[in-house]
Amino acid sequence: MLIETTDAHFAALIVGAAPEGLTVAEGGVEGTEVLEMLRDLSATVGEAFTPNAWMMVEDGEVVGLCSLVRVPYVGDTVMIGYGVAESRRQRGVARRGVAALLDWARGDDRVSTVTAETAVDNLASQRVLEVNGFERFDSRTDEEDGPLFCWRVEV
């Protein structure tokens, strides 16, 4: 299940606390630096597009995060990113989270295409996208992240 992530949720996660009514996966979902970056990203994207960030929650536990990684471009195209707590990986969490995010996108008339990027050596993330109907359409090299595959799915 996805729960829209508010600034208060990010604030709780950053200090190692669980958002109200939830628990957090063992070891947390991300490090403080990444959580702060995601909080800032959500605020920036939120100036033009909401919702834009979600907690992946299973059995009352925050097990991952997903979000739009930039303000939508080309009119109705959104780019997503996602991550799963290390202690919850290899359990289908990312697959289910991306599927839920695509369900949201299908119900939002502002969105017709969802894109994502994966490192060329991140086979697990590539599989998550393939299982959810994404097709690889390009590749590029990012200054920080190195070689990437570009993916998209029409919703």
Image (cartoon, rainbow, N blue to C red):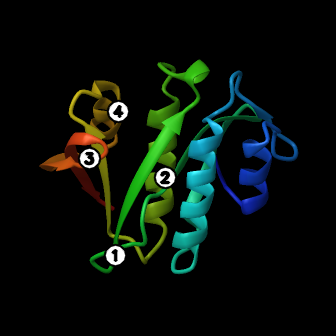
Choose the circle earlier in sequence order: 4 or 3.
4
Q: Which mark is residue 76?
A: 1
Residue lying at 23% horizontally and 49% vertically, measured from the top left: 142
Give left or right: position of 77 versus 27.
left
Residue at image coords 26%, 47%: 134
Q: Which comes before the other along the chain, label 4 or label 2? A: 2
| Disc 1 element | loop
Disc 1/disc 2 C-alpha distance (Å): 15 Å
Residue identified by numbered label 4:
125
Q: Residues within 10 Å of mark 3 (few under 14, many from 20)?
A: some
Residue 124 coordinates in the image, percent (x, y): 34, 26
Image coordinates of residue 125 in percent, x first then y, are 35, 33
As shown in the figure, which amino acid type bears the numbered disc 1? Asp
Q: Quadrant of residue 33?
A: top right
| Left or right placement of residue 124 versus residue 85 in this view | left
Residue type marked 2 = Leu
Badge 2 density bin: few <14, some 14–19, many ≥20, Cα 10 Å: many
Which residue in the structure is indicated by mark 2?
101
Residue for point 48% across, 71% down? 108
Q: Quadrant of the C terminus?
A: bottom left
Q: Are marks 4 and 3 in contact (CB under 8 Å)?
A: no
Residue 12 makes an appearance in the image: yes
Per the image, the residue denoted by label 3 is: 134
- In three-dimensional space, the C-alpha distance between marks 4 and 2, rounded to whole angstroms, equals 15 Å
Spatial separation of the CA atoms under disc 4 and disc 3? 11 Å
